[in-house]
Image (cartoon, coloured by chain):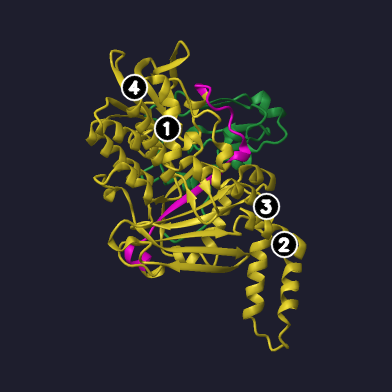
Amino acid sequence: MAIRVMDTPELLSLNKFNVDEKEPHIRLDKSKCRSCQDRPCLVVCPAGLYRLDQEGEINFDHAGCLECGTCRVMCNNKGIQSWNYPRATFGVHYRLG
Amino acid sequence: MSSADKFDAIVVGAGPAGSACAYILAREGKAVLLVERGDSAGAKNVSGGRLYAHALKALGDEFDISGGVERKVAREEIMVMAGNRSITVSYHDPELGGEGQIPNSYTVLRATLDGWMASRGEEAGAILACGIRVDDVLVQDGRVVGVRAGDDEVYADVVVAADGVNSLLAQRAGLIGDIPARNVAVGVKEVIALPSKVIEERFALREDEGAALLMLGCTGGVKGGAFLYTNKESVSLGCVVAPEEVAHKGKPVHRLLQELKLHPAVYPLIEGGETVEYSAHLVSEAGIRGVPGNLHRPGMLLAGDSAGFVINLGYTIRGMDLAILSGVAAARAILAEADPARVGPAYVSELEKLKVLPAMRATRGYVDLMEVPRLYENYPYLAVELFRCLFTVDGDVPARMLDTARGALRSANLSLWQVAKDAWRGLKI
């Protein structure tokens, strides 16, 4: 496989994850997100997990989260209701790091 | 974990700081619990990939790092880029690589390094408990007396928070507040597998030698830079940028990295390689100003990234060495003071002795210098433009050097006055 431009879904597919289907470790307050003008999360998440849906609402998919915390420090309007690390044994498992 | 256990110390986070602390304490006979939220030490950790080796001396002569590191860095390179053009400065020094002995620095992958260091701690007698997320500290009469993980509570004389840059534990214990976005950078990295022979040929290295390449001018004007470290059978290629500026400019950080991969000066270094992992992490960028006013409270110490111990001078970036030293400082303080109330102040004085805090203070000016926005676009452009003028022969009558320099300044949108001011700012540090 040659060196080439890869999008985030393909990059994330290289990693090992154990997704917590029951308890997302980051929760949004969509009403806050709706009124947020800045929406830095759409740009700064290295995994590109914050996306706009067809209605223009921000959606977050915790499945590919790299647990870096960038969204946490950048979310100024408190749309992130709660931010925790995933429950034990869940989340990303870096084989190299 | 059962509530009947009481330890001399609980160390939260099995990174370099936590494992160094646990290793020293266990070696000296203390009962230590080293708690890690990943399934194994290093499973949640990322760094660019270089450990300055001096810090290992503080762990004692018998501490063996051999299985935790990749290559001994003997080649240091700085690349300044503008568009498709670039200048590379390359410094090769076999002595930097230690010539079979202790080198100046090692390239590392964190799963390997952290796994190795945690195992040394375990070997010394620490109990390593992986796959446990510590949720909070336990406080009695204003003193931290242990930690809570889910429904489990474990007690200890001292809790050392070594849980990283985004330290939820330090926040819950009230030692730090919300992390200001301007205090951190976000780094993304691809590990690209390449045969060791190819790495050695491309970077002109001997068998166990490694190269470290730092890049400036490749972030679309955003404060930050990029790095490439050679591991045994892979290279770590990444970008580190200020998230506020990324948000402002609108180009996602992973996109910057993808463009970097195809840059004409970078592509030949990674050609034929295969990306095997993609990672991201925050880096503390505020220097001494990012270090919390209180590094301790009764019963609790902050070490490593949790305490903001990172020094970025642009050409050297230190984090893991300071993490190890702070872990050692925490252990020494715990060993030296029987009275728990005196452990905190003793920790700060050990940080002074091990030169962690003095180094942080001495490099205060660099943080301001890194704020100069011209560093990330105008100056790289100026340098590259000057080189282009020097090397281009087009049959015209050569311009006078002064005119060449004036032209380059103009096209880089810089005035001589601005350059002089910035140079003075740099020289004052």
Say if residue B354 shows up in the picture. Answer: yes
Marks 3 and 2, the one that precedes in the sequence? 3
Q: What residue does disc 4 label?
A: B338
Label 2 close to label 4 by CB (< 8 Å): no
- Counting other residues with Cα less than 10 Å from the Cα at mark 1, is it few (<14), some (14-19), or many (20 or more)? many
Is residue B429 shown left or right of residue B407? left
C-alpha distance separating marks 2 and 1:
42 Å
Label 3 close to label 1 by CB (< 8 Å): no
C-alpha distance separating marks 1 and 4:
22 Å
Chain identifier, green in the render: A
Amino acid type indicated by mark 1: Ala
| Magenta residue span | B172-200
Which residue is pictured at 65% across the width and 38% down the height? A40
- Counting other residues with Cα less than 10 Å from the Cα at mark 4, is it few (<14), some (14-19), or many (20 or more)? few
Label 3 secondary element = loop
Q: What residue does disc 1 label?
A: B162
Amino acid type indicated by mark 3: Val
C-alpha distance separating marks 3 and 1:
32 Å
C-alpha distance separating marks 3 and 2:
13 Å
- Counting other residues with Cα less than 10 Å from the Cα at mark 2, is it few (<14), some (14-19), or many (20 or more)? few
Chain identifier, yellow in the render: B
Q: What residue does disc 2 label?
A: B420
Say if residue B163 shows up in the picture. Answer: no
Q: Position of residue A73 (x, y in %)?
A: 59, 34
Marks 2 and 1, the one that precedes in the sequence? 1
Dividing the picture into quadrants, the one containing residue B184 is top right
Q: Position of residue B145 (x, y in %)?
A: 39, 16
Q: What residue does disc 3 label?
A: B372
